[in-house]
Image: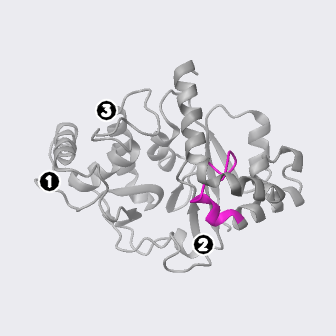
């Protein structure tokens, strides 16, 4: 795809930057070191001066585009945000949490809608938005700083009104803020419109470069082809490719997919116990 790419990099080495820059048409923006999850940088990255196009599309880095999505990287309505709605509404979309969202929007914006504009929240893995909404992105960024801890990870504690961190804050504004873009009826990036072009999101742990899980393995062929192209064109050496991303190791990791989530949980528990 020909669109310019802006990459947010936190604590990247020069080698990592050079590997990405070698692909061409890439700008790297250094993100200040923070204990807060990188996902909380979404609005700041989308509003960055490094973005020169009329439309900006945020894409989580734990996934890949399949096919040519060029047509969908420019919206048809500048007053819309193209983003996926959660269907059905997730467990954290409760009256109690909605009340907190409304309270906080009113507290920090001065006013809020009396009822939620939507009957579910959104998912922020892919967001397509016109740059006319830069002030909205700046308000989203400011709201993140006000309602989330400075050391928050990807998720808050279960039951929290902001369990999905940046995603929850975005949803609170879309539901209750008065001056926001409309959530589009059609999402387009999930393969329901065209199975030849979509965004494959490895949304669950472990990630494919760590260990294949049954959800991510649906896209293993597209992943292998991408990695093999990088090796064949000299962007990375085969010796640098993690074992799970090497096609010949698939039989081994395929046997482990049923237990992959449990292996990840044990590793997470070990890090927590050791304070690492």
Secondary structure of the magenta portion, mostly? loop
Q: Earlier in the sequence, mark 2 or mark 3?
A: 2
Q: Nearer the viewer, residue 227 or 243?
A: 243
Indicate whether residue 216 is drawn in magenta.
yes
Residue at the spot of label 3: 146
Residue 238 appears at what percent x and percent y? 88, 50
Q: Earlier in the sequence, mark 1 or mark 2?
A: 2
Q: Nearer the viewer, residue 39 or 135?
A: 39
Q: Nearer the viewer, residue 42 or 63?
A: 63
Above or below, comparing residue 268 to residue 96 in the picture: above
Report the residue at 28% width, 40% height from top: 159
For the residues labelled 2 and 3, say whether their Cβ atoms are less than 8 Å apart.
no
Q: Residues within 10 Å of mark 1 (few under 14, many from 20)?
A: some
Q: Quadrant of residue 274?
A: top right
Residue at the spot of label 2: 70
Question: In the rendering, which numbered label is found on residue 82?
Answer: none
Q: CA distance from mark 1 to mark 3?
A: 20 Å
Question: Is residue 62 in sight in this rendering?
Answer: no
Report the residue at 53% width, 30% height from top: 269
Q: Residues within 10 Å of mark 2 (few under 14, many from 20)?
A: few
Q: Secondary structure at mark 3?
A: helix
In this picture, which residue range is highlighted in magenta? Answer: 207-220
Image-based side of 155 in relation to 111, left or right: right
Question: In the rendering, which numbered label is found on residue 113?
Answer: 1
Q: Residues within 10 Å of mark 3 (few under 14, many from 20)?
A: few
Q: Secondary structure at mark 2?
A: helix
Q: Secondary structure at mark 1?
A: loop
């Amino acid at each position: 795809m020909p669109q310019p790419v802006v990459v947010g990099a936190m604590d990247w080495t020069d080698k990592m930057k050079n590997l990405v820059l070698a692909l061409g048409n890439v700008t790297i923006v250094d993100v200040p070191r923070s204990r807060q999850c990188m996902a909380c940088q979404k609005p700041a990255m989308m509003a960055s001066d490094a973005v020169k196009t009329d439309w900006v599309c945020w894409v989580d880095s734990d996934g890949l585009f399949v096919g040519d999505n060029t047509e969908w990287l420019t919206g048809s309505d500048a007053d819309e945000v193209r983003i996926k709605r959660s269907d059905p509404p997730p467990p954290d979309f409760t009256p109690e949490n909605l009340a907190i969202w409304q309270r906080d929007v009113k507290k920090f914006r001065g006013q809020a809608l009396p009822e939620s504009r939507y009957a579910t929240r959104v998912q922020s893995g892919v967001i397509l938005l016109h740059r006319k909404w830069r002030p909205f992105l700046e308000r989203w960024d400011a709201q993140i700083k006000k309602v989330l801890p400075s050391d928050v990870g990807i998720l808050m504690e279960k039951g929290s009104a902001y369990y999905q961190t940046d995603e929850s804050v975005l949803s609170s504004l879309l539901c209750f803020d008065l001056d926001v873009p409309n959530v589009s009826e059609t999402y387009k990036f999930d393969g329901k419109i065209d199975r030849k072009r979509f965004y494959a999101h490895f949304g669950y742990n472990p990630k494919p470069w760590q260990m294949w899980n049954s959800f991510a393995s649906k896209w293993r062929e597209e992943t292998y082809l991408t990695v093999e192209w990088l090796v064949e064109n000299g962007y990375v050496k085969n010796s640098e490719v993690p074992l799970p991303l090497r096609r010949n190791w698939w039989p081994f990791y395929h046997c482990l997919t049923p237990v992959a989530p449990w292996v990840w949980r044990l590793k997470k528990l070990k890090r927590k116990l050791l304070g690492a």
